[in-house]
Image (cartoon, rainbow, N blue to C red):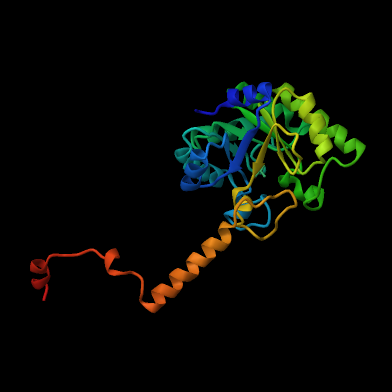
Amino acid sequence: MKNTVLTFKQAKEKGEKLTMLTAYDYSTAKLIDEAGINSILIGDSLGNVILGYEDTISVTMEDMIHHSAAVARGAKNALVVCDMPFMSYQTNVYDAVVNAGRLMKEGRAGAVKLEGGEEVIEQVRAIVNCGIPVCGHLGLTPQSINAFGGFKVQAKTEAAAKKLINDAKLLEEAGAFAVVLECVPAKIAEIVTKELSIPTIGIGAGNVCDGQVLVYQDMLGMFSDFTPKFVKRFADIGDIMKEAFMNYDKEVKAGTFPEKKHEYTISDDVLEKLY
Ligand code: KIV
């Protein structure tokens, strides 16, 4: 069944958990979609896991559109949510609306996600008013990594926790259909989840959130540059891939691959005329 923002609303009302995974290409999106995951996020974590940057700062609109369109072609039922990259919405409301529109028109996303609360609330309101669903993102917002001074758990002080709770309420009032909570104490995520009527999607925010999201390379053991505490490895595909690459290398160099069964044939009549 096709997942939409209504699926998210109904899941919250019924107390049913939601699942979201990142994807950046057609074949992975297809596998995730076929597995029945509710939503696929083209995260700007693309910068880390696909493009090899240290952070998400350099990711561009063109990067996001390119990968979003590929994912959208593979996602039949999952709700496709595309991250708005750094500086595509923080500048002003006009930029935010135009760029959110491009992610939908050119990237074929069903919704956009952006980081921040009060400081971007006018942007959220304006994008929602254009008929583009918005998912918020609070807590550890990687586009602000330079302001945070590193990847750190957020909302640990009274003031920071109060701001996060208030930001979440503002996002709901502005029309966001869901809020991602990243790297916040589970008890704070619990307060937000109880106070909002839209679903919270946690990543490093405990089990009480209405749903969970993970970067697929993290949960499959395919990315080892850094592994946050909140990641669970559901498989070690990285090791399996490496072993397959090594076997391929060995067989080609030993002359055992390709075998006869991998060859194409040609009739002797044609062949004879070539000599
Ligand atoms: O960019 C991303 O992958 C994300 C998730 C970690 C939520 O924003």
Residue 8, quarter of picture: top right
Q: In the image, is residue 224 above or below residue 259?
A: above
Point 64% across, 39% down: residue: 88
235 w.r.t. 185: above or below? below
Provide residue 183's location: percent of width, then percent of height. Answer: 77, 44
Question: x, y (%) of residue 199?
Answer: 69, 28
Quarter in which the C terminus is drawn? bottom left
Q: Is residue 57 left or right of residue 37?
A: right
| Farthest-out residue, right | 158
Residue at figure coordinates x 70%, y 50% from the top left = 231
Q: Which of 57 and 215 is in front in this view?
A: 215
Of residues 74 and 117, which is closer to you in this image? 74
Q: Quadrant of ligand 1?
A: top right
In this view, the residue farthest toward the bottom is 254
Image coordinates for residue 263, horizontal then vertical, percent: 26, 65
Dividing the picture into quadrants, the one containing residue 205 is top right
Identified at 83% across, 35% down, the residue is: 188
Q: In this view, does 81 lie to the left or right of 137?
A: left
Whether residue 218 can be seen here:
yes
For residue 275, above or below residue 201: below
Which quadrant of the figure has residue 256?
bottom left
196 on left or right of 96: right
Question: How many numbered tags mark residues here?
Answer: 0
Q: Is residue 95 visible?
A: no
Image coordinates of residue 221 in percent, x first then y, are: 62, 56
Q: Nearer the viewer, residue 235 or 83?
A: 235
